[in-house]
Amino acid sequence: MRPLLPLRLRRAAAGGLPRCFGMARRGGPAWRLSIEGNIAVGKSTFVRLLGKTFPEWQMATEPVAKWQKVQASSSREQTSSSQNFGNLLQMVYQEPSRWSYTFQTYSCMSRLKAQLEPLSEKLLKTWDPVQIFERSVYSDRYIFAKNLFELGHLTEIEWTIYQDLHTFLLQEFGDRIALHGFLYLQATPEKCLERLHRRGRPEEKAIQLEYLEQLHTQHENWLVKKTTEVHFENLRNAPVFVLDVNNDFEDDPAEQEELMRKVKAFIKTL
Ligand SMILES: Nc1ncnc2c1ncn2[C@@H]1O[C@H](COP(=O)(O)OP(=O)(O)O)[C@@H](O)[C@H]1O
Ligand SMILES: Nc1nc2c(ncn2[C@H]2C[C@H](O)[C@@H](COP(=O)(O)O)O2)c(=O)[nH]1
């Protein structure tokens, strides 16, 4: 593991003034936060609310549609009718032992690409730019891949190769993919199951409460209890802000305002 400067100093070295100097600035390095949380806890809904409240911020949503329709990369020569290789999300739920390694490789790559996206023109003109990511390369490993290994859907050799690849890629990309903090949307597994049923994504029909309980425990161990062994210094020290989203805030403007106020206050502490 390469030694890293504390994030504030790295931001300063990269040309932007860290907030501890108390000055807003335009176009400097952005604050980069990931929204984490269980399946159907409300991450996409929350990201939409952030987008509405802070239209100048840049949002990277989780590329679920890409996992539902895997296609060859567009950088190669393309015909107008791109070939569809299948619904990997459905495949991993139907046959987890066969498809978990493939899924984690693909999801990790898509998260890596999202975290490498440059700042948009709009964000470059913004005072105190903020980039929001729906999940991260870290939840890929410390929530999903870890859980699939513990369930026996990733073999020892697959888990070893995945971790080796993950560590290598994250070290290679270093600061370019660094995050300054995490917003953990927390709700009971029962509440998540209720919302999952309400959303009605066909691939998720067979998900049982037990799976959401396992993922809930993985989130708590990583982000709250900090008992998950992590392999990146900057991750160990990254601030985590826990937001209780058990309440139905979708139709409650006061609750929405309070949540947005908390996010702004969290960013001020970074
Ligand atoms: N706070 C909330 N209160 C009530 N319903 C919610 C809330 N957040 C999300 N939902 C609903 O729950 C379902 C899952 O939300 P979604 O944002 O897609 O979750 P995620 O992105 O975490 O998987 C959607 O039908 C959404 O409308
Ligand atoms: N096996 C994995 N499944 C994953 C991963 N990331 C997301 N998912 C699944 C969970 C949901 O069914 C769907 C979208 O997630 P939301 O929580 O946004 O609804 O994709 C993963 O890394 N591995």
Image: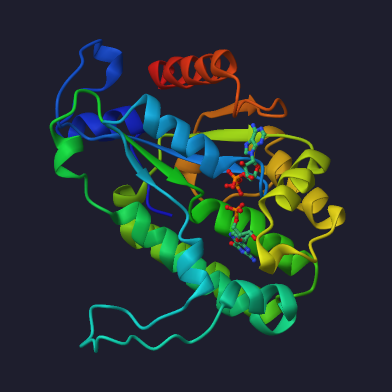
| Residue positioned most to the top | 22
Q: Quadrant of the N terminus?
A: bottom left
Left or right of 13, for residue 192:
right
Q: Quadrant of the C terminus?
A: top left
* Residue shown at the point (38%, 30%) measured from the top left: 52
Left or right of 203, for residue 60:
left
Question: How was the colour assigned to the protein in this rendering?
Answer: rainbow
Q: How many marks?
A: 0
- Rendered view: 195 above or below 84: above
Quadrant for residue 25, please give it.
top left
* Residue shown at the point (78%, 44%) measured from the top left: 194
Residue nearer the viewer, 125 or 239:
125
Left or right of 162, for residue 225:
right
* Residue shown at the point (79%, 61%) measured from the top left: 207
Is residue 231 at all visible to an observer of this figure?
Answer: no
Quadrant for residue 131, please give it.
top left
- Return the x and y of residue 242 as percentages of the image width and height: 62, 27
Residue nearer the viewer, 138 or 132:
132
- Return the x and y of residue 38 as percentages of the image width and height: 67, 46
- Rendered view: 19 above or below 210: above
- Return the x and y of residue 49 as percentages of the image width and height: 46, 31
